[in-house]
Amino acid sequence: KQSLLSMDRKREQEERELLLLALETAQLRVVVKRPIHANALGVVTPILEDEEGNDPTSVTTGKEGGESITERSATVPKPSYTISGTVNRWDVYVVNSNPRL
């Protein structure tokens, strides 16, 4: 069970990182298809720390002088709006509300 939780957290972190990259490169909007009952990527499930006492919102990026360097993960915005279907939901993140044509 512990490894499944860590795999889920890793997957969620990877999804957030991919969304942040998409938001940086998008010109108008980013649309993310999610299961209807899933949390939005910008909503972090409230877990104070994992079984080892680590903060799940931080990422260890390397070591310097024998000590781990930990960085806070970047904040992912909440969707601008959502479009709901019967099984899936599309979270829409508007990047530029006033595009130049």
Image (cartoon, rainbow, N blue to C red):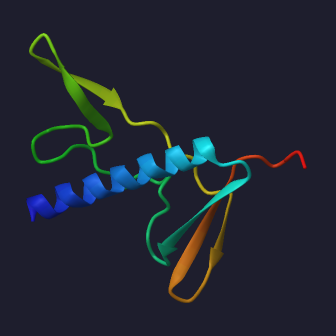
User: For the point 84% across and 47% down, which residue is it?
Assistant: 99
Pick whichever, 54 or 87, lies toward us.
Answer: 87
Q: Is residue 11 above or below residue 56?
A: below
**Based on the displayed image, in which of its 4 quarters is residue 66 positioned?**
top left
Farthest bottom residue? 86
- Using residue 51 as the reference point, say whether residue 30 is left or right of it: right
Counting from the top left corner in percent of width and height, residue 89 is at: 56, 76
- Using residue 20 as the reference point, say whether residue 95 is left or right of it: right
Counting from the top left corner in percent of width and height, residue 3 is at: 11, 59
- Using residue 54 as the reference point, say whether residue 52 is left or right of it: left
Farthest top residue? 65
User: For the point 18% across and 55% down, which residue is it?
Assistant: 6
User: For the point 49% across and 72% down, which residue is it?
Assistant: 34
- Using residue 90 as the reference point, say whether residue 73 is left or right of it: left
Counting from the top left corner in percent of width and height, residue 80 is at: 68, 57
User: For the point 50% across and 61% down, which residue is it?
Assistant: 40
Q: Quadrant of the N terminus?
A: bottom left
Counting from the top left corner in percent of width and height, residue 57 is at: 33, 40
Farthest front residue? 101
**Number of numbered callouts drawn:** 0
Q: Is residue 49 above or below residue 93?
A: above
